[in-house]
Amino acid sequence: MDRWLKTGSVKRKAEETSNVSDEVNIESQGRPSLQQDLAQHSGTSCAKVKRKYHSDYIKFGFFWTGDAEDPKPHCVLCYDILANEAMKPAKLKRHLETKHKDYICKPVAFFERKCEELERHMRKEATHFFVPGENAKATEASYKVSLLIAKAGKPHSIGETLVKPAAKVMANIILGEKASDELTLSNDTVQRRITSMAENVQDQLVTRLRQSHLFSLQLDESTDIGNEAILLCFVRYIHAGAVVDDFLFCQSLPTNTTGEAIFESLNTFIVQNNIDWKRCVGVCTDGAAAMTAKHKGLVARVRAVAPSAASTHCCIHREQLASL
């Protein structure tokens, strides 16, 4: 009897379990499964978050640039542009502490002034390249082609005699005749484009020099193929926590390349671009008297305005003297 009751109860439980499972299967039809719900939820949570700029971030030396919906932090000290994911106080502070240690204790007003300088610089660049009334895309294409001509060292006239006719043929075939009439690559236009790009590069270099606490110069006098004396000047400075070497300028000199004439050419460039002479800590030259003379040489004159500047004899000139 007990055995029969136990057997009967087991059967009833099995039937109830079967009925419950059938109900579950019926209810589950027509709606996503639990795994599908989890997959959809995880897909929603993994969507990329666009971080917004907050005015408090200026205390870390950062403004923003780019699209307002996807802003990117823009450092007002080194002009570096970071990804949108870096728009966090901790990451912006780490950038300031690792790359600009000397500016950690600066007040907010200092960074606001730097921000204004950055905005003026960006507006200047925008108006420097694009002239109102010109086709923006055609102007951009003209600049890029002019840059290629300059890098290749070709005559400026090649833009009008070869590049533009070839571009018109390709544009007529691919885009139509109207598109080929926008591009301007005359001799004067190419020269003007190259000059404006050179001025822009110089402005960027001068801006970096003004921001660098220290810099050093390397100078040499040479003669070009026209037998004209020229002064070549290179600069080494600190930018974004790294030591950078750049070509500073190339200028003509009078026939008598004395220490006074060389210093006058160098000093004119430094003064006109508002670069602080006191930040100059080194001058590298050859051993010529015009450069190293004790009283009237270039080094002596530089030390008069930059007392901390150390003189270095160029190692390449030393090797040449040793080989003679």
Image: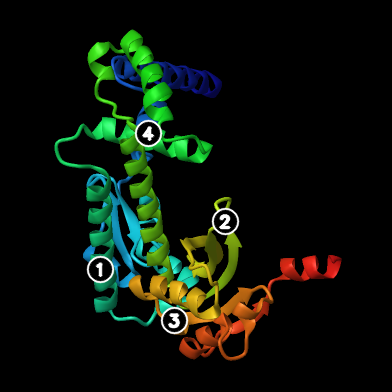
Residue 92, given in percent of the width and then of the height, sits at 39, 64
Outermost residue, top side: 173
Alpha carbons under labels 2 and 4: distance apart: 71 Å
In the image: residue 18, left or right of residue 216: left
How crowded pointer 3 is (Cα within 10 Å; few <14, some 14-19, many 20+) is rated as: many
Give the camera-side residue of 44 and 304: 304
How crowded pointer 2 is (Cα within 10 Å; few <14, some 14-19, many 20+) is rated as: few
Residue under pointer 3: 277
In the image: residue 11, left or right of residue 174: right
* SS category of the residue bearing label 3: helix
* SS category of the residue bearing label 4: helix
Residue 53, given in percent of the width and then of the height, sits at 26, 57
Identified by mark 3, the residue type is Trp
Looking at the image, is mark 2 or mark 3 earlier in the sequence? 2
Residue under pointer 1: 56
Identified by mark 1, the residue type is Asp
Circle 2/circle 4 CB separation < 8 Å: no
Q: Nearer the viewer, mark 1 or mark 4?
A: 1
* SS category of the residue bearing label 2: loop
In the image: residue 28, left or right of residue 229: left
Identified by mark 2, the residue type is Asn
Residue under pointer 4: 43
How crowded pointer 1 is (Cα within 10 Å; few <14, some 14-19, many 20+) is rated as: few
Q: Is residue 52 visible?
A: no
